[in-house]
Amino acid sequence: MKFILRLGLALLTGFVSVSTASAQAYGTADTNAPELRVPKSVQPAFDYWMRDTWATLGPDGYYYITGTTSTPDRHFPGQRHCWDWNDGLYLWRSKDLKIWEAMGRIWSMEKDGTWQKDPKVYKEGEKYAKKSINNDPMDNRFHAVWAPEMHYIKSAKNWFIVACMNQSAGGRGSFILRSTTGKPEGPYENIEGNEDKAIFPNIDGSLFEDTDGTVYFVGHNHYIARMKPDMSGLAEEIKTLKESKYSPEPYVEGAFIFKYDGKYHLVQAIWAHRTAKGDTYVEKEGVTNKKTRYSYDCIIATADNVYGPYGKRYNAITGGGHNNLFQDKDGNWWATMFFNPRGAQAAEYKVTCRPGLIPMLYENGKFKPNHNYQAK
C-alpha cells in the first residue's frame, strides 16, 4: 500500500475515499509494512507515566531518560495526563539500558523558574480548553512543562535542557536551561536568552551540536537558529528549514536533528491515517478525522547542510513519533517511543504512555527498526 496524500478527498461513512486522479504517491511510508513496525519484543523500559521520551548517553557512561510526565500525587477523575499542569522535570539513569534508577525531580517551575514560575489561571468567563485532545477534563490552571530534552554540549562541557511551557503567567514557548554544577541532575537555571521570556514562542524546542562544535536551536517545527558560542542565547535570527513538504502538508511536530554518515537527519512526527482499504494518507494541517487516525509515526529526511534542503521524508517507525535516536556504548542505534494512546494502533499496546527503547538499523542511508536485535 502506498503512502497516499490527500489533495481532494471526500469523507464517506467515516472513511476516506481516495481517487487516483486526486491523490499522489510520496515516499515509502506504509503503516502495513512489517519492517517499519515496532518489534514485539519492545516493552516499557520502566513503569512510569511519560510522553515524548528522550534518551541520551552521557560522558559519564550513564544513559539518561527524561520526558513529559504528570504530577505523581495528583488525583485524576479520568485518565492520568499532563495537558493542563504538572510539577516539573524528572530524570532516570542506567548503566546498561536495562536497570533504571530514578533521580527524582531535577527542575521545578515554582522553585527554579523565572517567567515560568507562576501558572496561568483562567478567570470565570475567559475562554480556555475545558477538555484535552483525549477528552480528559482539565482545570482552569495551566502550568505544564512539556517535551524536555537533555543535551551534553561538548563545546561547552556542560549539560543543557531544552523544554517548553504549555502556558504560564509569563507566557508559553520553548526555553533552554543550563546546569549550574555541570552535572546532569543540575540544579538548572535559565540561560540569559530566556531569563525573562521564552526564547521561541512555540513548543517542542530542540538542540543540535554539529561536529565542529557549533550548536543550533531547532524549533517547532520547521525552524532553526545558530546559538552563541557561550550558549547564552541565539546568535542569529530564526530561519525556516528548507524541506520537501508533503502535499498537502499535515501538522508536524517533535523536530530533532542529528548527524551521521556525513548527513544531517531531520526527525519529525506526524499522524498517519488509514482508508477503509488500508491505504495510508496524511491530512492537511487543521483537518482531523478521528475515525481514520491510525499511528503517530517517526519520519526522517536527510540533507547535506543543516539548514537544508532536506530530501523526501520517509517513515522510519510506525508508531514511534516524537522521539529521538541515539547510539549506545557499542555504537548500536536506538530510538525512543512512548506508546501513544491515541489512534487505532494504540489497541495493540498493553500499556500506553511509558518510556520505550527500539533497537534500530541504518541501511542504505535510512533508519528502521532492528527486528533481529539480540540483547546481550
Image (cartoon, grey):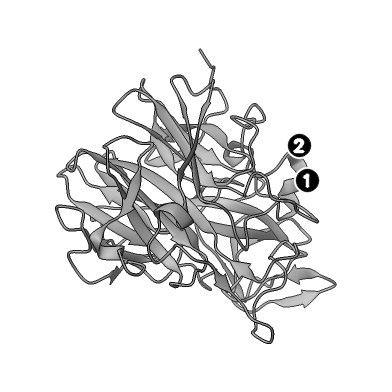
- Image-based side of 360 in relation to 209, left or right: right
Q: Residue furthest top?
A: 376
Around disc 2, counting alpha carbons within 10 Å, would you say few (fewer than 14), some (14 to 19), or many (20 or more)?
A: few
Around disc 1, counting alpha carbons within 10 Å, would you say few (fewer than 14), some (14 to 19), or many (20 or more)?
A: few
Q: Taking 57 as reference, is 177 above or below it?
A: below
- Image-based side of 1 in relation to 220, left or right: right
Q: Position of residue 343 (x, y in %)?
A: 71, 55
Helix, strand or loop at disc 1? helix
Q: Taking 134 as reference, is 328 above or below it?
A: above
Q: Which mark is residue 347?
A: 1
User: Dot 2 corresponds to which residue?
Assistant: 350
Q: Identify the amino acid type marked 2.
A: Lys
- Image-based side of 84 in relation to 247, left or right: right
Q: Which mark is residue 265?
A: none
Helix, strand or loop at disc 2? loop
Q: Which of 179 and 57 lies nearest the eye of the viewer?
A: 179
Q: Which of 87 and 130 lies nearest the eye of the viewer?
A: 87
Inspect this view and state whether residue 29 appears: no
Q: Identify the amino acid type marked 1.
A: Ala
Q: Position of residue 245 (x, y in %)?
A: 44, 67
Residue at (37% x, 62% y) in the render: 114
Q: Which of 50 and 107 lies nearest the eye of the viewer?
A: 107
